[in-house]
Amino acid sequence: MSLTHSLKMKHGALFLLLASCCYVRQTQSEFFTSIGQMTDLIYTEKDLVKSLKEYIKAEEAKLAEVKSWAEKLDELTHTSTSDPEGYLGHPVNAYKFMKRLNTDWLKLENLVLQHTSDGFIANLSIQRQNFPTDEDESGAAKALMRLQDTYRLDSESISKGRLRGVQYAASLTVEDCFELGKIAYNDGDYYHTVLWMQQTIKQLEEEDPGVVTKAEALDYLSYSVYQMGDLRRAIELTKLLIAVDPAHSRAKNNLRYFKNLLSEERQDDQTTDEEFSQSQSKERVYARQDSYLHERDSYEALCRGEGIKMTARRQRKLFCRYHNNNHPRLIIAPIKEEDEWDSPHIVRYHEVLSNAEIERIKEIAKPRLARATVRDPKTGDLTVANYRVSKSAWVDDDEDLVVNRITRRIGDITGLEMETAELLQVANYGVGGQYEPHFDFSRRPFDNNLATQGNRLATYLNYKEEPDAFKELGTGNRLATFLNYMSDVPAGGATVFPDFGAALYPKKGTAIFWYNLFRSGEGDYRTRHAACPVLVGSKWVSNKWIHERGQEFKRPCGLTEVD
C-alpha cells in the first residue's frame, strides 16, 4: 500500500471517529442514563487517541520522506547548476531530468498535498506549468534509444553510464530502465522494449528489488518477443512469468495462444521435431524496424566515424592556406582556410567567431528558441518533424552590432552578396538532437540532362519536389550554406555527407562552407547532409543560407549544367 493511499485511509478513519463523537454529543441525554454506555465512549475516545497517534506517525513518516526528497534534490541541483549545459549534455542526465520534473515532482506534489502546505503547492502548481509533459519525457526516452541505435550502445553500457568507452557518473535505475521499455512498448517499438526489459530484469537480479517486479518486466518482455516473431522464446519467457506469478491469468492465456501458433508453424513448415528444435534453438538477433531513410546505415556509420572515404590520394589534394578573397579587410587580417573535401569542395574557416561573439549570439537567441521546423513539401508550410530534433531562433542583422558584423564577415569570406541571404539561424541540439539527411536547397522537377551527376539521382527521384519553397522570399534558391560551429561537442554531433562519405566534426569558432547549387542553378544532390545525434554535450550552431539573387556577377554561370 502506498503512503499516499495509507494517509487517505487514515484521514478517512479519523473523520469517522470524529463524526461518531459528534453524534454522541448530540444524543448524550440518552447515554447519560447508562454508565455502561458512557463507558463505551471512554473506549471510543481511546480508539480516537490511538487513531490520532497513527495519523501523527503517518505525518512524521511523510515528513521524513519529504526530507529525503529534499536532500536528494538538493544534491542533484547542486551538481546540475554547477554546469547546466554540461549536465544536460549527457543523455542519461537529460532523460532523468525530464523524468524527474514530469513524474517525480508530481509524486512529491501528491505527497505534500496531504498536509496544510498551501504556499508550497501554489508555488509548485504555478511552476509546473513550465515543466515537461508526458510527451517531453517520452521524447527524451526516444532520444536515448536513438543514440543507442546510432552509436550501437548496448543497454547495460547506457544504464551504467559507459558511453563509447568513457565512464560517466550518470546511471539508470531499475525503474528508469523499466520506464524506457514501457515508453517503447506504448509506441509499438518492440525492438527497444525487448532491450530495456531485458536490462530491467538483469538489474533486478543484481540490485535490491524496488517498485518494479520481475513479473511486470517479464509480462512486457514475453509479449514483445512474440511480436518480434520469436515464438519459442516467447513461450519460455511466459512460462517463467507464470512461475514467478502463478496467479497471472493473462500469462496463462498467452501461453496457450503461443503454443497453438507454434504447433501451426511446425505443421505448415512440415519439419520434423528434431529439425524444428534445432532451428528454434538458435538465438535470434532481433532486427530494428525498417527506416524510410534509404541511407540510414551509411548515415549512422559516418556518425560513428565508420565508412569515411578519405583516402591518401584525396588527402593529397587538400591544403590549408590564408584566404583574403582580395577583400581589403581580409588582406589586412586574412582568414585561415582548410580544405575538408575536394569534390564537392567543402572548406573550413578557422577563428571565424570569437568567444565573446558566440556568447552574444546565444544571449540573443536563447529567449526565443523554439522547436526547429522544416518546410512541408506538399503544402510549403513550416512544420515540426521527428527527423529534425533541435531548437532554433532567427536573428536579424539589425538587432545587434555583433550579428551585423558576423554577416558582413561571411560576405567578405565568401565574396557573395548578403542582401538576399536569410537571417542568421541559431540552433541548439540537446540530448539526441539531430537533423537526418536532407537537402538545403529546394528540389526542382528532375531533368534527364542532369544524369551526368551519376546514378545517385535515381535514388533521389522519390523525394518530394519543393519548387516553390522560397518563392515568397523572391531571392531564388539556396545557393550556399555557411555553418558556424559555436561549441565543441565531446561526443557525437558531426556533420556528415552520406553520398560521398565525409564526416566533419564541430570545433568551436570554426565554420564550414559549401555550394548547394552548380553554377547553372541546378541542385548538387551530393550535398545531402545530416547533423548526427549529440551523444554527450550541447551543440550550438548558426547557419547563414545564401541565395541566388544578387550573385549573378559574383558567381557567374558555367558552360555546362554541372560546372
Image (cartoon, rainbow, N blue to C red):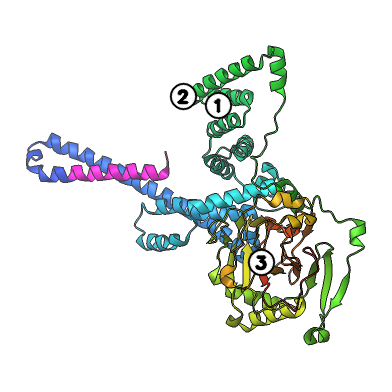
Badge 3 marks a residue whose secondary structure is strand
Residue designated by label 1? 241
Residue 264 location, quadrant: top right
Q: Mark 3 near mark 1, Cβ–Cβ under 8 Å?
A: no
Badge 2 marks a residue whose secondary structure is helix
Residue 24, position as x, y percentages in the image: 14, 42
Kindly report the distance in space between the C-alpha atoms of the residues bearing marks 3 and 2. 52 Å
Q: Mark 3 near mark 2, Cβ–Cβ under 8 Å?
A: no
Main SS of the magenta segment? Answer: helix
Q: Which mark is residue 91?
A: none
Which residues are the magenta region? 1-21
Residue designated by label 2? 249
Residue visible at 60% across and 31% down?
Answer: 225
Q: Nearer the viewer, residue 521 or 255?
A: 521
Crowding around mark 3 (Cα neighbors within 10 Å: few <14, some 14 to 19, many 20+) is many
Residue 269, position as x, y percentages in the image: 66, 17
Residue visible at 53% across and 58% down?
Answer: 379
Which numbered disc flags the more N-terminal residue, 3 or 1? 1
Q: Which mark is residue 540?
A: 3
Kind of residue at disc 1: Leu
Kindly report the distance in space between the C-alpha atoms of the residues bearing marks 3 and 1. 47 Å
Residue 546 location, quadrant: bottom right
User: Which image quadrant: the N terminus?
Assistant: top left
